[in-house]
Amino acid sequence: MPAHSEYPIVEERALRPPRRRLGLFPRRDPGELPETPVGTVLVFALNGGYKAYTEGQHLRGSEDAVVEARSVSVVYMRNRQVTVAIEMPSQDMGYDFLLKVAFRCKVTDAEAIVSAGVENATDVLANHLRDDAQLMQLGTTRPIEEVHLLSVEVTNRVRAYLEFYPPQVDGLEVALVNVALLAPNDILTHGQRIKKLKWDGESKELRWAIENRDVARIEEIFKRGAEATTAFGVSREQLLVTDAVGITREAQETRLKTLSELINRMPDGALDFLPIDTHRLIDKMMTSVIGDSSFVEAPKAAEPPSLGAGRSSQNGENGPRRIGLEELDD
């Protein structure tokens, strides 16, 4: 249907008296009649009645109804969905709920429509809904933010009201399509802004939690030593494998050098009193330096060194006495 300002009566036009040809036969110029878009019919107002001409019928101007008509109306005959919007007061002063009700309408009698003067079905249906006082008061018990909670009550009320009190419009068949309850645009914008702030906060907390877990994981890798840290750099593509090998070898040499200096500073024979597997230590040092196990054979049955004479530190009796590292300098 073309865009018309009104429904179901699209246009109305007053007609002048017809002209007579040769003083005998009156005839109306078809150019005086309004255009009839697809889906519309012309309804002529006569003295005491109305006459509709079916869709697609071409008029010559000599038809009795056309000649005698004082006015003509264009009526749209096809199905059309009409949406009615009315405001419902809320608990908050200055804010109203917006009720939108969609109807499917169809003209069944164009002559009755013109006779009843139904120029705009939207206004007729809106007034019919406003006649339900209980419906109009439902919103006064709710703040404007609770539109989602009130929506169910309003929908049920509208359906019940229209079922028991359907709109009566002469020549027009009306059926309910759907019901929607909306909040004002500024309330919707405010709610969207609050929701966005909440989502942004949740996103930040999630990113922080992920970062904290990543930091803790990297910290654990660093605690495992230079080899683990270097491997981590390779996995992140921050180090080349050749560079990683050099860094690892340098770290190993530094540790061995430090260990060697520590051993050299110890008194002679101090290793015999420490819980150290000498063979295993030498093997690890050789493997790190030359890449192979050591050639030193481990003793098959290593016996602990004999302790010198002295008094026992536990029972105070005569016998072997253990010497601690703190006594090696004496």
Image (cartoon, rainbow, N blue to C red):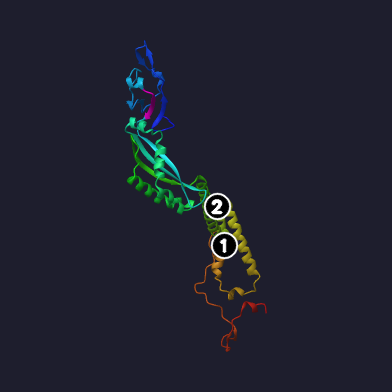
**In the image, farthest residue toward the bottom:** 317
Q: Quadrant of the N terminus?
A: top left
Q: CA distance from mark 2 to mark 1?
A: 17 Å
Q: Quadrant of the C terminus?
A: bottom right
- Residue 109: quadrant of the picture: top left
Q: Which mark is residue 234?
A: 2
Nearer to me, 302 or 267: 267
Q: In the figure, 8 relative to 94: above or below? A: above
Count of numbered badges drawn on the protein: 2
Residue identifier under label 1: 223
Q: Position of residue 152 (x, y in %)?
A: 40, 51
- Amino acid type of the residue that numbered disc 1 sits on in the rendered structure: Lys
Q: In the figure, 253 relative to 312: above or below? A: above
Q: Position of residue 260 (x, y in %)?
A: 63, 66
Q: In the figure, 6 relative to 189: above or below? A: above
- Residue 121: quadrant of the picture: top left
Q: Secondary structure at mark 2?
A: helix
Q: In the figure, 225 relative to 266: above or below? A: above
Nearer to me, 106 or 220: 106
The mark lying in front, picked from 2 and 1, is 1
The answer to whether residue 36 is visible is no
- Residue 311: quadrant of the picture: bottom right
**In the image, farthest residue toward the right:** 330
Marks 2/1 in contact by CB < 8 Å: the verdict is no
Q: Position of residue 327 (x, y in %)?
A: 65, 79
Q: Residue at x 55, y 52 (%)?
A: 234
State left or right for residue 13 relative to residue 93: left
The numbered mark, 2 or 1, whose residue comes first in the sequence reads: 1
Rate crowding at label 1 as few (under 14), some (14 to 19) or many (20 or more) other CA atoms within 10 Å: few
Question: What is the span of residues highlighted in magenta in the rendered image?
Answer: 69-75
Q: Residue at x 42, y 25 (%)?
A: 13
Nearer to me, 146 or 49: 49
